[in-house]
Amino acid sequence: MIRHCARAGRALLAFLLPDACLSCGAPLGDGERNLCPACRGTLTARLRALPLPAATASAEQEVAGPSGQLRAAALFALAFDGPARALIHALKYEGRPSAADDLAEAVGPLVGRAARGVVDAIVPVPLHAVRLRERGFNQAEIIARRIAPFVGAPVEASWLRRVHPTRTQTDLSRTERLANVRLAFEADGGHAAGRRVLLVDDVVTTGATLAAAAAALGAAGAECACFAVTGTKPVDKGAGGPLSFWIRLAHGACCA
Ligand SMILES: [Zn+2]
């Protein structure tokens, strides 16, 4: 409750003072954008390269797809709190695209080091057409376009479609989430076949959505997938394990 009030207070402050830090409400200086230097420093310090989480071990077969050829590799993410959470909210719910610049600047260098030269395309996790119409933009695609210069690969948003709307996953267990998104995606085999793909999403919780998206690419003949997300939410007990499962440093490049 106190946290909610504090967050609401910061949001109100940011609304009243547009030049305030989105995370802590401190006034921003000249040339500063969205975050104060202290919060920006925390943001980059919270970046982790993570292996595909143990919490999604049962999803690995789904990631492999029917051919079993698709290999999924590293996952890059910021802990979903403080400034990362503030930026993702500003992008997603306030439509502030400059927040995607900050997220990409935090995640991009590490993703670029791992993925440059080893992925052929960057594919944002799509929204269903109905959700896209409601929101007006796909935040994952905006982030993907900001990450692209670090990776040096084109963004191919049309390679993956969300063919079934999925209900909100917030209250679902990991198994229910997997069932919820299992057939949500369809990939364009004409383009994805034989390609190495970097999948980008804004937030990952259990990995069920990423696993389903990667499985669709695998079914369409894609060779491998690695993942870049800008926030990892801790999951409730019973929904796939705590965030600590994720905090094991990934080794080297994705799709290696
Ligand atoms: Zn701040």
Image: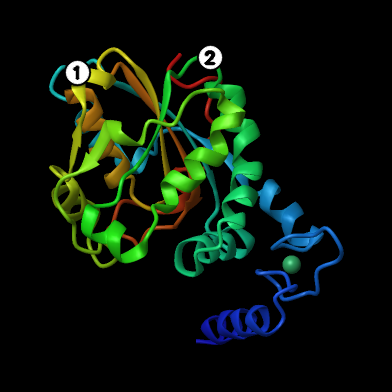
SS of the residue at dot 1? loop
* Position in image of residue 128 (x %, y %): 23, 52
Dot 2, crowdedness within 10 Å: few (<14), some or many (≥20)?
A: few
Q: Could you say where residue 180 lies in the image, as x and y percent from the top left?
A: 16, 53
Viewer-proximal residue, 184 or 239?
A: 184
Badge 1 local density, few (<14 within 10 Å), some, or many (20+)? some
As displayed, is residue 108 above or below residue 192? Answer: below
Figure quadrant of residue 158: top left
Which disc number belongs to residue 68? 1
The residue under label 2 is 117
Q: Residue at x 44, y 57 (%)?
A: 234
Relative to 7, is 157 on the left or the right?
left
Please indicate whether residue 38 sits to the left or right of residue 65 in the image: right
Q: Between 231 and 216, which is closer to the camera in this rendering? A: 216
- Residue placed most toward the observer, 167 or 235: 167
Cα–Cα gap, marks 2 and 1? 23 Å
Q: Relative to 137, say whether 187 is above or below.
A: above
From this viewpoint, is residue 202 visible? no
Label annotation for residue 198: none
